[in-house]
């Protein structure tokens, strides 16, 4: 299992800003982060699944 921090998530999504990422979370386009020791991380496989699902819905 690979965890992404905010900067890694931003890079994976094409350099999206922090505020754009949080809008994506609120709208359900990407999963909620998990908190590990006061920092937020996203599980990469969950992010990939969400992105794949969003692409299929758009098609």
Image (cartoon, rainbow, N blue to C red):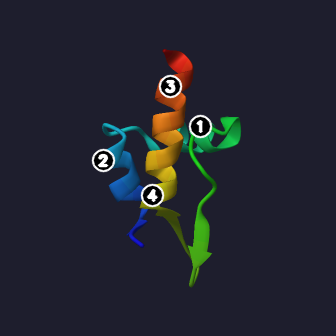
Residue located 39% across and 70% down the image:
2
Q: Of label 2 and label 1, which has the lower sequence position?
A: 2
The residue nearer to you, when weighing 23 against 59, is: 59
Residue 41 horizontal side relative to residue 2, left or right:
right
Residue identifier under label 2: 11
Residue 39 horizontal side relative to residue 16, left or right:
right
Residue located 60% across and 51% down the image:
31
Residue identifier under label 3: 56
Residue 41 location in percent, x, y?
50, 67
Give how far apart the Cα atoms at labels 3 and 1 are. Answer: 12 Å
Residue identifier under label 1: 29
Q: Mark 4, residues whose alpha carbon is within 10 Å: few (<14), some, or many (≥20)?
A: few
The circle drawn on residue 45 is 4
Q: Of label 4 and label 2, which has the lower sequence position?
A: 2
Q: Mark 2, residues whose alpha carbon is within 10 Å: few (<14), some, or many (≥20)?
A: few
The residue nearer to you, when weighing 52 against 27, is: 52
Q: Mark 3, residues whose alpha carbon is within 10 Å: few (<14), some, or many (≥20)?
A: few
Give how far apart the Cα atoms at labels 4 and 3 are. Answer: 17 Å
Give above or below for 52 relative to 10.
above
The circle drawn on residue 1 is none
Residue 56 location in percent, x, y?
50, 25
| 4 vs 1, front mark | 4
The answer to whether marks 2 and 1 mark residues whose Cβ atoms lie closer than 8 Å is no
| 2 vs 1, front mark | 1
């Amino acid at each position: 299992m690979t965890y992404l921090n905010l900067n890694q998530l931003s890079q994976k999504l094409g350099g999206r800003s922090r505020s754009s990422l949080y809008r994506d979370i609120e709208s359900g386009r990407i999963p909620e982060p998990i908190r590990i020791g006061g920092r937020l991380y996203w599980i990469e496989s969950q992010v990939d699944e969400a992105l794949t699902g969003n692409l299929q819905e758009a098609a």
